[in-house]
Image (tube, rainbow, N blue to C red):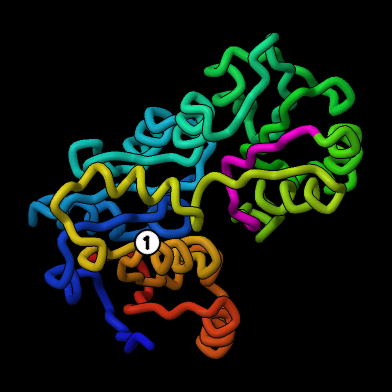
Amino acid sequence: MTSTTGAESLRAIAGDYDAFFLDQFGVVHDGSSAYPGAAEAVAALADLGKPVVFVTNSGRPAAFNEARLARLGVPRETYLACVTSGDVAIQLCEDGVFPLPEDRRIRCLTISSLDDYNLSDRLGCVRTESGKDADLLVIAGSQADTIPMSDYEAMMRPAAERGVACICTNPDRHMLTPSGLVPSAGAIADLYAELGGPVTFVGKPHPEIYEAAFALIPGVEKRRILCVGDSIDHDIAGAAGLGAAAALVRTGILADVDKAEIDGRLASAGVTVDHILPALRW
């Protein structure tokens, strides 16, 4: 068991670690604005010479996420890299780890938010809007705040019945919206699996995204990395799988969850945290 410390700021614990893997949504920003003090905390780590890597369950490429961080006040020069699940998934496909048909152009059905066809387009797939003729299903995002899950089920069922492979580039099961938490891409992928379709998840808490981030900081021991996130199932479980330390922030999806429930969720997931922070601030 790990002894958990409550700290009011990142400053109190930063000296104990050599590198930081930061979640993006729910930690640095809420999708539309940065949390107070978050950008300053990232800059303070940079000033100490501590490498910061954003490790994010985003189906979009690093450049897209870097541009959004910059708009929200987090300059590119304050962190080492942004490792996205979308980029990692493309690499797995290109390396043959995730097998794809090679005898023809692949017809790909993409479920995403705001027309994110990153994986499909970069692999040269043909877009389709139907599960009836799809050779591949990519679940990169969700519009479950406006599209009922029953509509997603109807769209995906024909593909699931044919056993079409699915790659989910955002395993998050909940996302923050102005109306509250709604099902995210991971929940849609779970539904596809319930329909009988095979799903490969790429992103936190699965190891490939962490190994991609870890490769960027040679010489740093895994136990000297602090992973900071707001999700027990993704950020904290992912840190445990990597063998890194973990800090849970009380923003994002845990903003309205009391400590007793958090303790129960940690116990249910079989993980512990090293630190609990009210927010990412210096």
Per the image, is 165 magenta?
Answer: yes
x and y, in percent, of residue 97 in the image: 53, 34
- What amino acid type is highlighted by mark number 1? Leu
Most foreground residue, 138 or 222? 222
Look at 40% across and 72% down and name the residue there: 248
| Prevailing secondary structure of the magenta residues | loop
**SS for dot 1:** helix
Quadrant in which the C terminus is drawn = bottom left
Instruction: Give the magenta part as a residue range.
Output: 164-174
x and y, in percent, of residue 183 in the image: 71, 54
Question: Hey, which quadrant is residue 222 in on the image?
Answer: bottom left
* Image position of 39 with respect to 279: above or below: above
Look at 49% across and 24% down and name the residue there: 94
Q: Name the residue under label 1.
A: 242
Question: Can residue 258 be seen in this snapshot?
Answer: no
Most foreground residue, 37 or 134? 134
Look at 34% across and 55% down and name the residue there: 22
x and y, in percent, of residue 29 in the image: 43, 52
* Image position of 54 with respect to 226: above or below: above
Most foreground residue, 57 or 216? 216
Per the image, is 169 magenta?
Answer: yes
Crowding at mark 1 (Cα within 10 Å: few <14, some 14-19, many 20+): many
Look at 20% across and 57% down and name the residue there: 19
